[in-house]
Amino acid sequence: MQASGFQEIVLAVEHLTVYQETYMAVQDVSFVLPAGTDTAIVGPNGAGKTTLVQAVLGILPHQGGTVTLLGKPLSRRGYLAFQVRQQVAYLPQSFLFDRRIPMTVAELVGLGWDQLKLQLPWIDNRRRRFAVEGALYRVGATHLLEQFISGLSGGEMKRVLLAYCLVRPRRLLILDEALSGLDVQGESDFYELLYELKREEGWTILQISHDLDMVRRHCDRVLCLNRGLLCQGEPEVALSPENLFAAYGSAFVRYRHHH
Amino acid sequence: MFGELTHIVELFQFPFMQRALLGGIMTGCTGGLLGSFTILRQLSFFSDALGHSALLGISLGLLFGINPSLILLPFAIVFALGVTYLLERTRLWTDALLNIIYSASLAIAIIILSFVGHYKGGLTNLLFGDILAVGEQDLITSGILLLITTIFIGLTVRIQMLITLCEPLAIARGVPVTIHRTVFIVLLSLVVGVSIKAIGVLLVSAFIVIPACTARLLSRRFFSYIPLSAGIGASSAVVGMVCSAAFNLPSGPSIVAIQLGFFLTATLRGLFSAQSPT
């Protein structure tokens, strides 16, 4: 926490280096996320984007550098204080879990509310239910409450996952291409909803995205990643043709100019 | 028909039958509880390999003159943890590796048993189960195991749900996934080890897998799916035991046949109901 007058730093990453076996997947990356900002990570496939966010969350261990979330350090092996964990929500890449798992929307969103401590299953049922109904109402999905997750459409699933993030107050949302596989119409609706909630909740967002137009429209900052950090800054600067060329190579820049 | 009924009622007077019933209820419950997570985590084949390896444990006990009941459970735990470690380290496919492990342990066990002359006759009982073999000590072990499993699942059910749904999501929420996975594997190997006597090494995994699949066909709500799986496990074990005693059939295959009966009924119900396919 910083003194008033300064913008609070939600996430600080310094010289982060992550190896996957012997391959250096993320090399000496440093950046900060001030509270309330929306930062996009862009870069070609295999650039280490998912590795970077998974290391920031402690899902993968890191070998060099430091990660500080809400003022608390993340250990090399991925331990982070529980109070901080509660304030961070993460949606993995194309969250395609096994739809054969028997679960209702209420049960899934309820998992987002839970403290995940040792407790009897029926404890806090009423409070959980209240929070779940409230979260589903805010994403316009009240009617899905008792639906089975096996029957949801892609767009409905995204709303349900947003409710999973929303069901408890959070400070930081980390989205790994949370929208891939959604039709264009549904995508713009979803972003509208996401940014409305972001304003209301005061979320800070870190998201991986391939949609550079969306990034230009919505994001405050962009990180261009290709193992190392090639550039960072406001979208107009970071997504200039020169920087895109450096990140993606010539083919991608030609593609962007023709479309 | 009436004669058969009297015969069954008479059977209940025997202590061995009462033990078998009680044992069936308890192991059926435990198998159903753990099985409900086992099938969702796609560990069904793993439980099969555990069952086959139990024979190796028993045969080693016989070879070295140690009571097989004493060696079985420690062996099952060590074996399960060893296999888990191997699966995480190897670059081979899980099902291929498990196939190697269970055929190899079966082969080695049969070879060892051929040296233990007096146990040759007992091989069928080991492979297919024997309700007469369920003793008081086994009932106590089963009871403790059911208690531990119920408490463990009861206190961590939402954690288990999140791990089952998506491991990275659970890690991001601060769940010590490795510890939970290990505890689950240990419990699974214990329940397989305890169930071996009545069900037999070849069929024990059916005890874990079939009732859970039946429950999955009948329910898509997690909090009814788990108790349903335990209930189906217990009731098919009881019905199977009774049939086994009444018609003098091997107990393991009888239980599995009953489990299959429940499963097919659930499948037919799914086919004929107006609901979307499950």
Image (cartoon, rainbow, N blue to C red):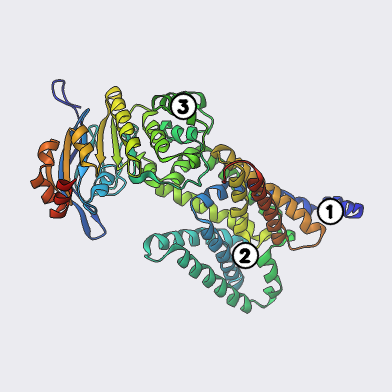
In front here: A247 or B52?
Answer: A247
Eye-nearest disc, 1 or 3: 3
**Residue indicated by mark 1:** B11
Q: Amino acid at mark 3?
A: Thr
Q: Amino acid at mark 2?
A: Leu
* Position of residue B88 measured from the top left corner of the image (x, y, whole percent): 39, 59
Does residue B23 appear in this view?
no
**Residue indicated by mark 2:** B202
View extreme (left): residue: A242
Q: Are marks 1 and 2 in contact (CB under 8 Å)?
A: no
Considering the numbered disc 1 on the image, is that residue within a helix, a strand or a loop?
helix
* Position of residue B11 measured from the top left corner of the image (x, y, whole percent): 84, 53
1 and 3 marks on the same chain: no
In front here: B251 or A209?
Answer: A209
1 and 2 marks on the same chain: yes
| Chain identifier of the residue bearing label 3 in the image | A
Q: Callout 1: 10 Å neighbours few (<14), some, many (20+)? A: some
The residue that appears at 68% across and 65% down in the rendered structure is B128
Quadrant of the frame with the C terminus of chain A: top left
